[in-house]
Image: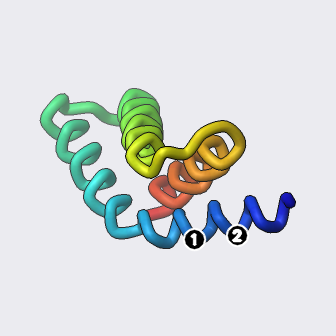
Amino acid sequence: MIKTLALVALALGIAGAPALAYADDACMTQATDKKLAGAAKTSFMTKCERTSCEGQAKDKSLHGAAMTSFVKKCTKDAMTM
């Protein structure tokens, strides 16, 4: 069961990869417009990317553990880009 859930989360994560690039650009643009730097910028980027990932999860009708897994992976991927 856990392996199946992990595979579903991975597949959804791969399918959502192009949207991550857009979310990262949008968050960076907003941070630049607000002239944020340092810790404030890091905090803003984390929250912005998490919000974007949660929206993607809702669009995919994910709930419970699948949503949590997707948001966690999505946010991690967005922060490494």
Evaluate whether residue 42 shows in this view. Answer: no
Residue 69's label in the rendered image is: none
Q: Secondary structure at mark 1?
A: helix
Q: Check if mark 2's residue and mark 1's residue have beta carbons within 8 Å.
A: yes
Which residue is depicted at the point 46% across and 39% down? Answer: 54
x, y percent for residue 24? 32, 53
x, y percent for residue 1? 86, 60
Q: Secondary structure at mark 2?
A: helix
Name the residue tied to disc 1: 11
x, y percent for residue 48? 37, 36
Residue 75 in the figure: left or right of residue 25: right
How far apart marks 2 and 1 lie (CA) works out to 6 Å
Of residue 41 and residue 38, the one placed in the foreground of this image is 41
Q: Quadrant of the C terminus?
A: bottom left
Name the residue tied to disc 2: 7
Q: Quadrant of residue 27?
A: top left
